Image (cartoon, helix red, strand yellow):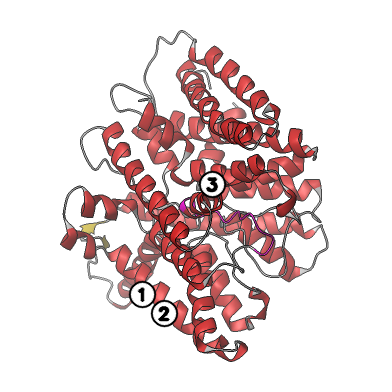
């Protein structure tokens, strides 16, 4: 990592991050709480950011490898700085605070707290705000505010952070593209806040839930998550969890380009809706007898499929009542998740479709060796490089899950608990069976699971590139 431009870009990220910390400071002042937990990380972030940004850079060429390193280092540094408010305000250990911080920024929603209702208003806000920041991506936000490169070479940074097989500019200029995407992100969030207000929540709590939903995170301000919410508000949150699971390119096509027919022809969107609806029906059929009314069974099925499939992690009841068949389906949905280009974690539907088509093509080649079969996605030919990288990602995805499961296995919690813990963190879901919080896990496991959350949210490659760079 001899390229000073990498450090300069990280400096810009830290400066913007220090500005964002002003918001929880205002919340602290509003509720007459201490601002020290946020002043300290703000000062550290601003100081380091200004020092790095002041570096004299002669070589302003940004390569793809540099983009991965910028993304990986920025997320790690911000996660560490984001843990300071928890350590200062709650006097908890660094592994606990780091776990909570990483869970927030990666929009996982897993927590070490057994009683979130005892937390201060500013800390509750900070937890949901980390979801909101991490939802669209830390670097994506910075690039929307400050172009990291004048010649759009910062596209390498965008590709390294945004989920899915590929990222393309929707309009000329990255900054303009990101402006539109963030405008859509904010409009959806504000819309949810308004509907929750109509449903009877106060503004502060509506804002917390909307920010957590926007990032598909799952941090709530009640120990019961959303179980005590009105039926109207449960459906509101379920709706927006589903909406934030859609590729934001679809919204761009509809809102900005007015290409509604093109958007509705999206192969990924159709697969997402089909998988979503079929999962709800499957869950409803297998669980309706466990509820007092069909209405309760329906709301539970819709809400929890929305939560699991979009890697959000909110809950409105005891998910441990589900039979084994439903648990298997839910665990599969957790790993697959929703669309690329959304705020969700997981493997992504786009990759699933490409893998399916590759398997189908390979089988057809065995049956008809001389035949030629081209893999297409969204009406376009998928390059072999993309197909191969998708298969590589699948291998690494499964391999890393197994490695983390082996490491967590030393805790001695049992196979089901170990699988649940690893799946829910690596897939950035937060909600799982038989685990209400991660307080009982050792510091070692919390660090390992934190790394797993980062690997899952950054889609593996940035952290691998960073580790290989550190060895040189």
Looking at the image, residue 279 lies above or below residue 59: below
Of marks 3 and 2, the one in the foreground: 3
In this rendering, does residue 407 appear at all?
yes
Q: Position of residue 209 (x, y in %)?
A: 53, 54
Q: Which residue is mark 3?
A: 131
- Disc 3, disc 2: CB below 8 Å? no
Q: Nearer the viewer, residue 8 or 366?
A: 8
Residue shown at the point (37%, 52%) measured from the top left: 188
In this rendering, does residue 164 appear at all?
no
Residue shown at the point (42%, 72%) measured from the top left: 276
Q: Earlier in the sequence, mark 3 or mark 1?
A: 3
Disc number at residue 274?
1
Q: Which residue is mark 2?
A: 278
The 10 Å Cα crowd at callout 1, few under 14, some 14 to 19, many 20 or more, is few
- Disc 2, disc 1: CB below 8 Å? yes
The magenta segment: 214-224
What is the CA distance from the residue labelled 2 to the residue labelled 1? 6 Å
Secondary structure character of the magenta stretch overall = loop
Secondary structure under the numbered disc 2 in the rendered image: helix
Looking at the image, residue 22 lies above or below residue 213: above
Q: Nearer the viewer, residue 446 or 30?
A: 30
């Amino acid at each position: 990592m001899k390229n000073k431009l990498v450090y300069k870009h990280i400096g810009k990220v830290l400066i913007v991050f220090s500005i964002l910390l002003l918001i929880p400071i205002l919340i602290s002042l509003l509720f007459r709480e201490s601002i020290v937990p946020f002043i300290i990380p703000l000062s550290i972030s601003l100081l380091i950011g200004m020092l790095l940004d002041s570096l004299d850079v002669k070589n302003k060429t940004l390569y793809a490898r540099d983009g991965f390193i910028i993304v990986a280092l920025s997320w790690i540094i911000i996660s560490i700085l984001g843990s300071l408010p928890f350590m200062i305000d709650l006097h908890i250990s660094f592994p606990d605070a780091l776990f909570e911080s990483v869970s927030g920024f990666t929009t996982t929603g897993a927590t070490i707290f057994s009683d979130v209702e005892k937390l201060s208003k500013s800390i509750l806000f900070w937890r949901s705000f980390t979801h909101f920041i991490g939802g669209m991506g830390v670097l994506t936000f910075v690039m929307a505010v400050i172009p990291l490169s004048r010649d759009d070479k910062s596209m390498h940074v965008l590709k390294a952070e945004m989920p899915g097989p590929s990222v393309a500019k929707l309009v000329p200029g990255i900054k303009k593209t990101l402006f539109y995407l963030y405008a859509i992100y904010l409009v959806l969030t504000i819309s949810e806040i308004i509907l929750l207000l109509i449903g009877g929540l106060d503004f502060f709590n509506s804002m917390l839930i909307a920010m957590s939903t926007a990032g598909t995170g799952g941090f709530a301000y009640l120990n019961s998550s959303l179980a005590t919410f009105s039926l109207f508000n449960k459906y509101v949150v379920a709706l927006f969890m589903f909406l934030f699971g859609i590729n934001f390119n679809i919204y761009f096509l509809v809102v900005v380009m007015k290409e509604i027919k093109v958007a509705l022809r999206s192969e990924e969107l159709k697969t997402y809706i089909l998988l979503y609806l079929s999962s709800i029906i499957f869950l409803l059929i297998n669980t309706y007898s466990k509820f007092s009314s069909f209405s309760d069974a329906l709301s539970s099925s819709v809400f929890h499929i929305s939560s699991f499939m979009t890697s959000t992690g909110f809950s409105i009841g005891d998910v441990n009542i589900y039979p084994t068949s439903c648990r298997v389906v839910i665990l599969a949905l957790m790993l697959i998740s929703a669309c690329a280009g959304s705020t969700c974690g997981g493997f992504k539907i786009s990759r699933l479709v490409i893998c399916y088509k590759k398997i189908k093509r390979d089988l057809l080649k065995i049956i008809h060796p001389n035949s030629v079969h081209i893999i297409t996605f969204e009406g376009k030919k998928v390059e072999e490089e993309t197909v191969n990288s998708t298969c590589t990602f699948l291998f690494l995805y499964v391999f890393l899950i197994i490695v983390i499961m082996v490491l967590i296995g030393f805790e001695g919690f049992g196979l089901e608990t170990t699988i649940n813990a690893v799946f829910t963190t690596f897939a950035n879901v937060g909600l799982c069976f038989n685990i209400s919080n991660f307080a009982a896990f050792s510091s070692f496991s919390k660090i390992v699971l934190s790394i797993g959350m980062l690997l899952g949210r950054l889609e593996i490659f940035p952290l691998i590139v960073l580790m290989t760079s550190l060895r040189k």
